Amino acid sequence: MKVNSGIPGLDELIGGGFEEGSVNLVSGKTGTGKSIFCAQFLHNGAVNNNEKGLYLTTGETINNIKKQSKNFEWDFEALEKKGVIKLMEIEPFDIETLIERITENIEAAKAKRVVIDSVSMFELYMHEPFKIRKSLYKVLQRLRDMGKTVLVVAEVLEDSKSLSRFGVIEFMVDSVILLQYLGIAKYKRSLLIRKMRMTDHSTDIHPFEITPKGITIRSV
Ligand SMILES: Nc1ncnc2c1ncn2[C@@H]1O[C@H](COP(=O)(O)OP(=O)(O)OP(=O)(O)O)[C@@H](O)[C@H]1O
Ligand SMILES: [Mg+2]
């Protein structure tokens, strides 16, 4: 089963949408559109597919996400009142508590689509690489077991060529979508499907725009 992304032009590049029950990484430097991408995915689920969504955030405040979404006419406040979207700030406690809190909230929200924005905060709180790896693996496996379609945001530092801060999570997810901001030429923003397991996906670099309706992939 495929879960449509809500990003015009994307689903046809990834074989119809995200795989149901998959964990997908949205990776990019600051300001590349990661949070907008995720908000659009949840909004599309709630409004067009009757699928509940949960937005878990560590990096941005709920207010910021709501405010930014309003500019695209995605009224998360109204959707929250209707009970189809839930936004939550989570504190990265110890990993066991974190997994528990995440799963409890997903169950309570009856969410089918889940966003974690971002995973970098978890990584920062866990200093030992081995511990990071093990903890992340546990969280992601739990989400897959629950059959949710998940977007996880990874922040990439300005001078880095990696797909995440610690170069670990990209190996644990089913797909990686890399957002880039070049700031030059006609098309300043681009999207690359860096990997998508078991999918004959596009391997081109696709320019995209952030329009008043959100992210749209441009055909070139
Ligand atoms: N209404 C809008 N119309 C066009 N572009 C916008 C609009 N709102 C935001 N943007 C662009 O999107 C960027 C922010 O996108 P987003 O918040 O998704 O980035 P991000 O990748 O999550 O960044 P960070 O890692 O810092 O959280 C802004 O810097 C701006 O360039
Ligand atoms: Mg963000």
Image (spheres, helix red, strand yellow):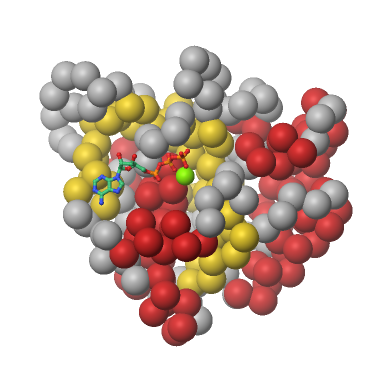
Q: Which residue occupies the foreground of this view, 149 or 94?
A: 94
**Residue 193 versus residue 42: which sits nearer the camera?**
42
Q: Is residue 143 left or right of residue 185?
A: right
Question: Which residue is farthest bottom?
Answer: 82
Query: On the rendered image, what quadrant is the C terminus found in?
Result: top left
Image location (x, y in percent) of residue 205 = 30, 24
Residue at x 44%, y 33% (from the top left corner): 30
Q: Position of residue 36 (x, y in %)?
A: 38, 50
Q: Position of residue 156 (x, y in %)?
A: 52, 27
Q: Nearer the viewer, residue 184 or 200?
A: 184
Tell me where residue 107 sits by quadrant: bottom right
Q: Is residue 38 visible?
A: yes
From this view, report whether residue 39 is shown above or below residue 53. above
User: Where's residue 209, x and y in %?
Assistant: 22, 40
Residue drawn at the location 53% of the way across and 71% of the way down: 86
* Vertical comparison of 113 with 179: above or below: below
Q: Quadrant of residue 201?
A: top left
